[in-house]
């Protein structure tokens, strides 16, 4: 209990006074009843679905046509290794939603910890992807080796770019919270960043299944 | 779990629904279930006898994970229905693109792929 009190004093107004303001800030009077920034993020995520949909479709079509040009997916994919990456990204979604839960309860310090944990897990995922890419390069697979190589690197590379953008976004939120700009009143800022981060996670859920696990 | 089930998005307006996000314990429980499903996916992948039904099984498990993250971590279960419709619209178009491309090109042979020499157009 005392820890919670200490956290509340680290960057926000007292909870009783701020709760009303927080709810007012989170629920502005728009014609739709939804904050415009949140609406915009969902519209972006819907459009990003189409973007990744085309990349996944391209991979699914092309991977069936590269049997003459090694290396083929089954030869180079390291499923246990990629599974760990999938777990890491999944765990980062949990830490992200815990960050949101913390700021909604006016626990700024705890939110900051979870945000840093999320950014770290995202960085671990990126490091893993870098290692995977370099090992594939050393085994002779690159962007121009085959249709499989082109579509694989394009798909996973764009996903990695999304993760990298998310990591920078999270770190910027950490810096903002240190400056006292993230409080319970604008928890929506964390929620919107969380929406983006969880989207990155669900895209990897699909990529992990469709690209790595389902046999060619 | 009870924290999630007591909110029905159909009965409350957006403001009311958004103020009822689940507890941290609920999020941890969802995370645990997602981790277990991922472990099951990898385990199924290693079983040779599962090969004939591997793809549909993995797709179902993957869809379950996808739905749980969107519903609970992204709060679509508790948010304004319009956001669900908006996201579903994008998802449906993406699914349509994937299906259409696979149907159009998935089984079509790709001539001259390894030689790099384009084939002559028909009729010339």
Image (cartoon, coloured by chain):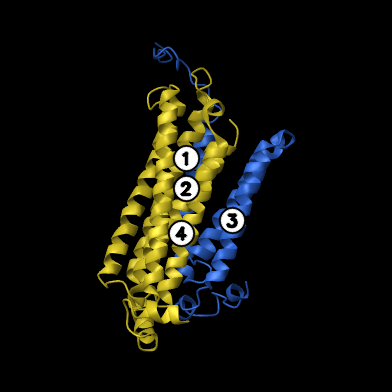
Chain colours: A yellow, B blue
SS state under label 3: helix
Say whether marks 1 and 2 touch (CB < 8 Å): yes
Front residue of B105/B62: it is B62
Q: Residue at x 56, y 60 (%)?
A: B31
Q: Categorize mark 3 by other alpha carbons within 10 Å: few (<14), some (14-19), many (20+).
A: many
A132 relative to A8, above or below:
above
Q: Name the residue that disc number 1 marks.
A: A56
Q: Residue furthest bottom?
A: A17
Whole-number angstrom distance, CA of label 3 to CA of label 4: 21 Å
A97 relative to A203, above or below:
below
Identify the chain of the residue marked 1, using the numbered disc in the image: A
SS state under label 1: helix
Query: Closer to the observer: label 3 or label 4?
Result: 3
Q: Residue at x 52, y 40 (%)?
A: A82
Q: Looking at the rendered structure, which numbered label has been put on residue B34?
A: 3
Earlier-in-chain disc, 4 versus 2? 4
Is A198 left or right of A172, judged from the image as shown? Answer: right
Front residue of A82/B90: it is A82
Query: Closer to the observer: label 3 or label 2?
Result: 3
Give x and y (percent) for residue A35: 35, 72
Q: Are marks 3 and 4 on the same chain?
A: yes
For the N terminus of chain B, the quadrant is: bottom right
Identify the chain of the residue marked 4, using the numbered disc in the image: B
Give x and y (percent) for residue B24: 52, 70
Q: Name the residue that disc number 4 marks.
A: B87
């Amino acid at each position: 209990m005392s820890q919670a009190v200490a956290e509340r004093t680290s960057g926000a107004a007292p909870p009783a006074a701020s709760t009303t303001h927080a709810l007012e800030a989170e629920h502005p009077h728009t014609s739709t009843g939804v904050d415009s920034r949140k609406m915009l993020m969902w519209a972006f995520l819907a459009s990003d679905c189409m973007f990744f949909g085309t990349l996944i479709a391209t991979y699914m079509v092309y991977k069936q046509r590269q049997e003459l040009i090694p290396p083929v997916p089954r030869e180079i994919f390291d499923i246990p290794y990629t599974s760990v990456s999938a777990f890491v990204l999944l765990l980062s979604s949990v830490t992200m939603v815990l960050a949101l839960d913390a700021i909604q309860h006016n626990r700024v310090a705890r939110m900051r910890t979870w945000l840093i944990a999320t950014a770290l897990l995202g960085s671990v995922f990126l490091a893993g992807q870098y290692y995977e890419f370099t090992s594939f390069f050393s085994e002779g697979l690159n962007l121009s080796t085959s249709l499989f190589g082109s579509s694989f690197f394009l798909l996973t590379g764009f996903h990695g770019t999304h993760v990298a953008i998310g990591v920078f976004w999270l770190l910027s939120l950490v810096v903002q919270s240190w400056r006292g700009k993230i409080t319970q009143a604008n928890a929506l800022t964390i929620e919107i960043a969380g929406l983006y981060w969880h989207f990155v996670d669900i895209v990897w859920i699909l990529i992990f299944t469709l690209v790595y696990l389902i046999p060619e | 779990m009870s924290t999630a089930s007591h909110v029905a998005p159909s009965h409350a307006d957006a403001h009311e629904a958004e103020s009822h996000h689940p507890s941290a314990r609920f999020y941890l429980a969802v995370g645990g279930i997602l981790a277990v499903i991922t472990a099951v996916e990898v385990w199924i992948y290693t079983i040779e006898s599962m090969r004939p039904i591997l793809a549909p099984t993995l797709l179902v498990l993957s869809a379950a994970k996808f739905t749980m993250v969107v519903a609970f971590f992204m709060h679509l279960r508790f948010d304004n229905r319009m956001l669900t419709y908006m996201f579903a619209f994008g998802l449906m178009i993406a699914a349509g693109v994937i299906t259409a491309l696979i149907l159009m090109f998935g089984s079509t042979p790709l001539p001259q792929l390894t030689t790099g020499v384009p084939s002559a157009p028909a009729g010339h």
